[in-house]
């Protein structure tokens, strides 16, 4: 990609706090920002977040039932671990709201530094947290607190890079640019699952549950530090700040945004529900269900999922080409139909033998790559420019909360107590919601154009 020189000029008072100016001086040699640099910042930032996310998710299945809920049967322990897992999704919108206020007062770079510092501290806190055998119920309380802090920090980590990348993309390549940040999901899963496979394969149960499981959380802390500097390299430059301001990608009041654009928040939160529901049903849920009720071992399931994640990467890339050909909303709608069809085969595949279960995982990752590649910001173009920064961040938070936050808990609880057919219904409902909301969005767009 060719380098594009960004216009320079004085920064706004809101972004000129002393700490922000010091950070800018560190990177004052950057006279221009190439689109490729923005893309790299997006991929690095999202990969670090997804890696952190999957480390916790996999630990919720493999570790926490044993370390923090040893007094429960494995199923109940896993369900309790999934309850705490959901806390981050509940806390994330509050983090977004709180850190938007910090950004207005202290600047974007300071906000991002504080958010990723909190994320690193909470992640490292989990790594050093003693189990139930040492602290009793206090260990569970501390785990829940660290998980809430993770969610708040993730809400504050929104930097506007994906929106900036989408707005600067040529009209005919918006689908391609939209999928770049989504590559972080399969890449983050690959790294997290790979580390857990290595540790689980090479350590005995005692060592794994005593200290081995903590290592991925140390790695997550280190990756967050690298990601922080990679993103600060962009967000604190005068050129980047000026470009964001010209695009009106700045925080605004949430009440005002909801009064003016509340329907767009609703549409955006539900538009990719099928993809978000599938997200956990092919990553976290199969690992929990198969290891509880089927003959496959943990390592066997993780290896198949790693293969699926490798397959998902080119599928995410392909989603960009498809979206630029038929449109992003048409892509989401078509994949929602495919996910609906896939949902009917869920009981047969997951309830079958090893080959059938592997097919469920691999086909699920294909559909996930194609759909999730366009799940971010599919309808954020509906927001007027002044509300897009805040609207995109909050829409993403709500989509995660509604579509994925409770998916492992609901899927495992339903399948364990009522059968796998209810997992099929759960996935189908997500696909139907996506189709309904996309239809509503198309109607509203038509009404607006004829008004």
Image (cartoon, helix red, strand yellow):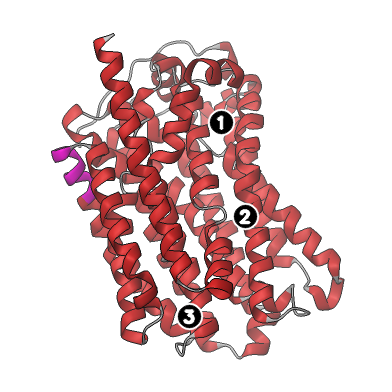
Residue 36 rendering spot, x and y as whole percentages:
28, 39
Q: Which mark is residue 109?
A: 1
Of callouts 1 and 2, which one flags the residue occurring earlier in the amino acid sequence?
2
Q: Which residue is mark 3?
A: 290
Q: Which of 88/13 is in front? A: 88
Marks 3/2: CA–CA distance: 21 Å
What residue appears at the point 33 percent right and 29 percent down from the top-left corner? 441
Which type of secondary structure does the marked residue at label 3 adopt? Answer: helix
Is 385 situated above or below 142? above
Q: Report the label total.
A: 3
Residue 29 rendering spot, x and y as whole percentages:
41, 29
Q: Which mark is residue 388?
A: none
Q: Which of 385/230 is in front? A: 385
Of callouts 3 and 1, which one flags the residue occurring earlier in the amino acid sequence?
1
What's drawn in magenta, residue-wise?
Answer: 319-326
Dot in front, 3 or 1: 3
Left or right of 175, for residue 147? right
SS majority, magenta? helix
Q: Which mark is residue 86?
A: 2
Residue 332 rendering spot, x and y as whole percentages:
28, 44
Marks 3/1: CA–CA distance: 43 Å
Q: In the rendered structure, does residue 369 fall within the stretch colored magenta?
A: no
Of callouts 3 and 2, which one flags the residue occurring earlier in the amino acid sequence?
2
């Amino acid at each position: 990609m060719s380098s594009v020189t960004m216009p320079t000029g004085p920064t706004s008072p809101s972004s000129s706090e002393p700490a922000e100016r010091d950070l800018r001086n560190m990177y004052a040699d950057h006279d221009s920002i190439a689109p490729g640099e923005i893309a790299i910042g997006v991929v690095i930032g999202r990969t670090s977040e997804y890696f952190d996310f999957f480390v916790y998710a996999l630990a919720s299945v493999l570790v926490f039932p044993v370390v923090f809920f040893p007094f429960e049967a494995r199923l109940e322990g896993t369900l309790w671990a999934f309850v705490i897992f959901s806390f981050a999704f509940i806390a994330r919108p509050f983090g977004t709201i709180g850190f938007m206020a910090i950004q207005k007062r202290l600047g974007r770079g300071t906000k991002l530094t504080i958010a990723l510092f909190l994320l690193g501290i909470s992640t490292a806190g989990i790594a050093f947290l003693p189990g139930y055998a040492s602290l009793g119920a206090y260990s569970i309380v501390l785990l829940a607190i660290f998980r809430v802090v993770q969610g708040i920090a993730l809400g504050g980590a929104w930097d506007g890079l994906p929106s900036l990348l989408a707005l600067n993309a040529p009209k005919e390549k918006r689908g391609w640019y939209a999928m770049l940040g989504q590559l972080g999901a399969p890449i983050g899963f690959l790294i997290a699952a790979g580390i857990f496979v290595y540790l689980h394969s090479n350590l005995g149960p005692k060592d794994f549950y005593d200290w081995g499981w903590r290592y991925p959380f140390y790695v997550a802390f280190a990756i967050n530090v690298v990601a922080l500097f990679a993103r600060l390299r962009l967000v604190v430059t005068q050129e980047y700040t000026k470009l964001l301001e010209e695009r009106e990608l700045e925080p605004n009041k949430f009440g005002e945004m909801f009064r003016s654009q509340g329907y767009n928040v609703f549409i955006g939160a539900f538009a990719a529900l099928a993809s978000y529901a599938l997200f956990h049903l092919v990553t976290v849920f199969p690992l929990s269900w198969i290891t509880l009720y089927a003959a496959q071992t943990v390592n066997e399931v993780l290896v198949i999922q790693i293969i699926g994640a490798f397959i998902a990467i080119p599928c995410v890339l392909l989603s960009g080409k498809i979206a630029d050909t038929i449109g992003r909303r048409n892509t989401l709608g078509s994949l929602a139909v495919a996910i609906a069809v896939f949902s009917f085969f869920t009981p047969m595949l997951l309830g079958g033998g090893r080959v059938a279960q592997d097919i469920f995982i691999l086909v699920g990752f294909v559909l996930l790559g194609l759909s999730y590649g366009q799940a971010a910001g599919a309808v954020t173009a509906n927001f007027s420019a002044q509300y897009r920064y805040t609207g995109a961040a909050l829409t993403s938070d709500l989509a995660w909360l509604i579509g994925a936050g409770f998916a492992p808990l609901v899927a495992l609880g339903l399948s364990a107590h009522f059968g796998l057919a209810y997992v099929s219904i759960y996935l189908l409902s997500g696909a139907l919601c996506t189709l309904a909301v996309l239809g509503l969005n198309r109607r509203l767009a038509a009404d607006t154009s004829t008004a």
